[in-house]
Image (cartoon, rainbow, N blue to C red):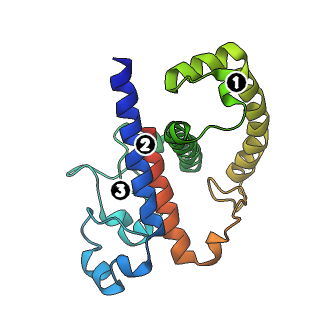
Amino acid sequence: YEFLIIAMLRFAAVLAIAAGAEAFAPSGVLPSAGVRAATKAAPSMQLYREGQLQGITVNAIPKSERPIGLDGTWVGDVGFDPLGFSNIIDMRWLREAELKHGRVCMLAATGMIVQDVYQFPGVTKTFGDAKMMGLHDAAVKQGAMQQLLVWLGFLEIFGFVAIVQMLQGSDRVPGDFGFDPLNCAKNPETLARRQLVELKNGRLAMI
């Protein structure tokens, strides 16, 4: 049973990484502007700038009213909110949480595969050859998970301050901590597509 769970998790991780590779495909591989114009009405082809070009014209749940909070301006917005969270919680808070959880899950999915092909120095000495759930249990026993809780909790303080400033009216975008070492934000259109890729890969990793 445990082997089946591990196999399923690793298969999902492979799918997430394969989807992420799409973000680095050469521009010639992607549909041209003319093709985008002809296909943007089809919700099955959700390419970059989806929230801007597609947005309000798409409803993920046919014959239902679009939630008021999903106005088509958010990246990846297809009007899907069957429980109505966007009607009672600030969308900026919801998007911040979605991005954060998606990023954590993408790191976890990557780690699931990396641990089979590479081990950092000292890991085997501390945790042996444990994998997946066994490694988690060993980390808890050794106290490593408690250390992670303390240090990540410390980092969360800074994240919380940024979120409060955003909710109080600053121009900060959800998920933006000014970390852009590759200068991906230089081109607005390229950035829009990468934001969509990040969001979709994050959603897949969470699943």
Residue 180 lies in what quarter of the image? bottom right
Q: Which mark is residue 158?
A: none
Q: Nearer the viewer, mark 3 or mark 2?
A: 2
Which residue is disc 1 drawn over?
125
Tell me where residue 51 appears, x and y as whole percent.
43, 65
Lateral position of residue 190 relative to residue 80, left or right: right
Lateral position of residue 109 relative to residue 60, left or right: right
Tell me where residue 162 appears, x and y as whole percent.
74, 49
Secondary element under disc 3, as helix, strand or loop, is loop
Q: Residue furthest top?
A: 141
Secondary element under disc 1, as helix, strand or loop, is helix
Q: Earlier in the sequence, mark 3 or mark 1?
A: 3
Q: Is residue 74 visible?
A: no
Please, what is the three-letter code of the amino acid marked with disc 3? Val
Q: Residue at left 26%, top 71%?
A: 41
Tell me where residue 202 appears, x and y as whole percent.
48, 48
The quarter of the rendered structure image containing the N terminus is top left
Q: Nearer the viewer, mark 3 or mark 1?
A: 1
Please, what is the three-letter code of the amino acid marked with disc 1? Lys
Query: Do the CB atoms of the residues marked 3 and 1 lie less than 8 Å apart?
Result: no
Q: Earlier in the sequence, mark 3 or mark 2?
A: 2
Which residue is disc 2 drawn over?
13
Q: Earlier in the sequence, mark 2 or mark 1?
A: 2
Secondary element under disc 2, as helix, strand or loop, is helix
Which of 84/99 is in front? 99
Which residue is disc 3 drawn over?
78
Tell me where residue 155 appears, x and y as whole percent.
77, 39
